[in-house]
Image (cartoon, rainbow, N blue to C red):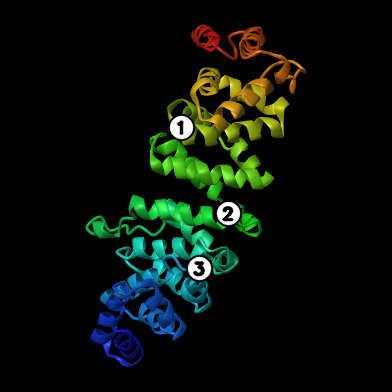
Amino acid sequence: MEEFVVQNLFNGEREAQIQAAAQLGKLTSKQRHKLAERGIISPLISMLQCQDYEAIEAALFALLSLAFGSERNKIRIVKSGLVPVLLELLQCQNGTLTELIIAALLIVSSCTANKLAVTSSGAIPILVGILNGDFANNDDDDTTNTISIQAKLDAIATLHNLSTCHQTIPSIVASRVVFTLLQIIHSYEKSSQFVEKAMALLENIVTLSENALLQTASTSGAIRALVETIEEGSPQCKEHAVVILLLICQSCREKYRVLILREGVMPGLLQLSVDGTWRAKDTAQELLLLLRDCSCYGSRSKQSKHELIEQIMQEIDAEGETVMGTTTLRMLEEMIAKLST
């Protein structure tokens, strides 16, 4: 079987190459590793450069099977020039193969050694374009060209893989992905997987880049969207949202404290401090301290939770209903009662 695959990939006609590529997925990981050492990656990448859909699909599946579970093969594949070929396919294909192409980018980008190579190939702006729908066909009669939600999820996951390498952050921020992610968070259900992935990527970027944090804080509607996510999101979404709000408030408390309060953050924040994830609880309580109108930030350990929340409500109440209405204050009282039990 191994000889059949090698001979047909290197010397076979179209049908023989497609059959050989299809056989790769049926081999053991050890056999696939041996075949990669024998150089079969190059003919597979050559198959991607033809105009034959069936050959391209077979080659993509074969490359995915080679890369899956093998860091060494992922490195070999990228060094063989896969990424530029995939990016060209993304821009010129009609959209049918988009999911497979982005899945391949996702797998090879998970390897630490590949992150800079993928970035330097120009993948980031193209992935952001996928999230923006830039590669969707405008022909309403051809619905097969619509970018699927799975392709967008994988695009976000690929960007997240790349964002774990600090050297890629300037390129990611320059792509204006922050605004794209905020649009996703604003437009989709806050509890959806799509928003959860977008929130995770946004948190990672703003944690590593002051420019990205400034872009987030200064974008119209961003703080409101984050507050809504604390109220309506999944537990992980809420965790990401409260971390981002804390970073915004820490960046310039004088500027953002009242802006955050005016979006009605307190009920959701107090709820999160009670029943969020462990990280969300700690972050929510830290943000509550920052939102206080006093100089006692950092003295949380000297107060009980009840005393802390009681003081926060009193101090914010003193600012009047220009920041918070009576309904919100009544909700705070209910939350304090819950915290005291």
Label 1 or label 2, whichever comes before in sequence order: 2
Helix, strand or loop for disc 2: helix
Left or right: 42 in relation to 211? left
Cα distance in 3D space between marks 3 and 1? 32 Å
- Residue displayed at 55% across by 58% down: 162
- Residue displayed at 63% across by 31% down: 246
Helix, strand or loop for disc 1: helix
Can the viewer see residue 221 in this picture?
Answer: no
- Residue displayed at 61% across by 29% down: 283
Spot occupied by residue 278 in the image (x, y as percentages of width and height): 55, 30
Report the residue that reaches farthest toward the right.
295
Left or right: 155 in relation to 28? right
Dot 3: few (<14), some (14–19), or many (≥20) neighbours within 10 Å? some
**Residue of label 1:** 235
On residue 71, the disc is 3
On residue 163, the disc is 2
Cα distance in 3D space between marks 2 and 3? 19 Å
Spot occupied by residue 234 in the image (x, y as percentages of width and height): 43, 33
Type of amino acid at the residue the image marks with label 1: Pro
